[in-house]
Amino acid sequence: MKLFHARNLREARDLFLRAAEGPERGVAERARLHVAMCGRRLEEAVQAPRTAEDHYTYGVALINARDAAGAREHLETALRLAPGSDHIHYALGLAQALAGDLAGAHENIKRAIELEPRNRILARQDADLAPLAGQPPFNALLRPEKKVW
């Protein structure tokens, strides 16, 4: 049960399978129920994203885990499925910025702002974009009201 509650489902399932073969009928029955629960939860965990929102959500989780390459892959798929989605452009721009692709990041953040102007405010406050905020193309994008001399 400790493994089950710790979400170590593969090991828990193996132990539940052994317990299900034991002589105690009540324990074996509960163990079989837990084997089924482990199986369902493991199956849910490996389902691949299908929709644009699924890919977007997974991509954002990968950004948070600092896996920029994996995030880009899922966000590019999401963008192919829903090309006019400002939030996907924004997230892809973040992933590209984290990966060091400044031109791609600029283009996607720019497109996110074109689609939804409120994204400019988000980008100004986004800690992931802070290192880029002072650079000329990003500065002009995030603060167009300031004239660069």
Image (cartoon, rainbow, N blue to C red):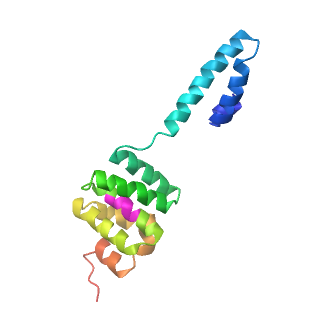
26 left or right of 138? right
Q: Give the range drawn in magenta.
A: 89-94
Q: Main secondary structure of the magenta part?
A: helix
Q: Residue at x 33, y 78 (%)?
A: 137
Q: Which residue is drawn at 34% across and 75% down?
A: 138
Vertical placement of residue 70 versus 148, above or below: above
Q: In which quarter of the image is the C terminus?
A: bottom left
Task: Decide whether residue 91 is among the magenta residues.
Answer: yes
Front in this rendered view, residue 126 or 5: 5
Is residue 126 visible in the rendered image? The answer is: no
Q: Which residue is drawn at 32% across and 60% down?
A: 89
Q: Where is residue 132 in the image (x, y as percent from the top left)?
A: 41, 74
Q: Residue at x 43, y 70 (%)?
A: 130
29 left or right of 113? right
Vertical placement of residue 12 versus 66, above or below: above
Vertical placement of residue 19 versus 85, above or below: above
Q: Quadrant of residue 121?
A: bottom left
Q: Where is residue 97 in the image (x, y as percent from the top left)?
A: 42, 69
Front in this rendered view, residue 119 or 63: 63
Q: Position of residue 146 (x, y in %)?
A: 27, 79
